[in-house]
Amino acid sequence: MRFALLLAGICILLSGCLEWTDSDRAILRGLGVDVPAENEPLPANTTVNPPVAPSINPVAQANNSTTLTSTSPPAFLHRTVRNCSTNLTISPEATKDLSDGYSNYNCENNYRWQCIADGSFDSYYDEWCEDKYGRKVDKYGRVLK
């Protein structure tokens, strides 16, 4: 219903039935849309250019968390073994130094893969990683916020 009302309002404004007010023009100019003043003639070339989105640094998504680029790969793996049905801890958190080349980790909660996908529903690894600076990172070394 809201969408229909919004669409109707936009159609009315675009069709010229209503006049633009100075506040409408101010809002559009604030968004980066070039709007001529009320009595100002339109430019000869009237192409419609939407505002350009600001450039964004490379951002990746991991576990629905925003990540930032980092140059440090994971240095330490923190792993807790949990029960699939109760999520209770089976063995306490163990920390593994990753400088020895160990690569069997995901730096995330593995419930979906080790309980549901494999069908065993016994236990899973709840993992997180940190870089050499102590920042929480994903498997690829990108800093998690």
Image (cartoon, helix red, strand yellow):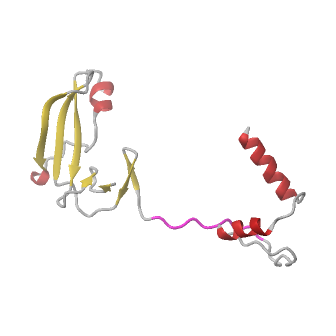
Residue 145 in view, yes or no: yes
Q: In the depicted view, which residue is nearer to us: 9 or 98? A: 9
Q: How many marks?
A: 0
Image coordinates of residue 95 in percent, x first then y, are 12, 45
Q: Magenta stretch: residue 132 in it?
A: no
Magenta span: helix, strand or loop, mainly? loop
Taking 13 as reference, is 140 left or right?
Answer: left
Q: Tell me the residue at 19%/42% (across/down).
A: 104
Image coordinates of residue 124 in percent, x first then y, are 23, 30
Taking 134 as reference, is 25 left or right?
Answer: right
Report the magenta residues as a range. 47-56
Q: Residue furthest front?
A: 23
* 83, above or below 108, in the image: above
Image coordinates of residue 36 in percent, x first then y, are 79, 75
* 118, above or below 42, in the image: above
Q: Quadrant of residue 41?
A: bottom right
Q: Quadrant of residue 73?
A: bottom left
Q: In the depicted view, which residue is nearer to us: 5 or 138? A: 5
Residue 32 in view, yes or no: no
Q: Tell me the residue at 13%/35% (across/down).
A: 92
Image coordinates of residue 103 in percent, x first then y, are 18, 46
**Quarter placement of the N terminus:** top right
Q: Magenta stretch: residue 48 in it?
A: yes
Q: Quadrant of residue 88?
A: top left
Taking 1 as reference, is 87 left or right?
Answer: left
**Quarter placement of the C terminus:** bottom left
Q: Tell me the residue at 25%/27% (across/down).
A: 87
Q: In the depicted view, which residue is nearer to us: 14 or 45? A: 14
Q: Residue furthest right?
A: 17
Q: Tell me the residue at 72%/41% (across/down).
A: 2
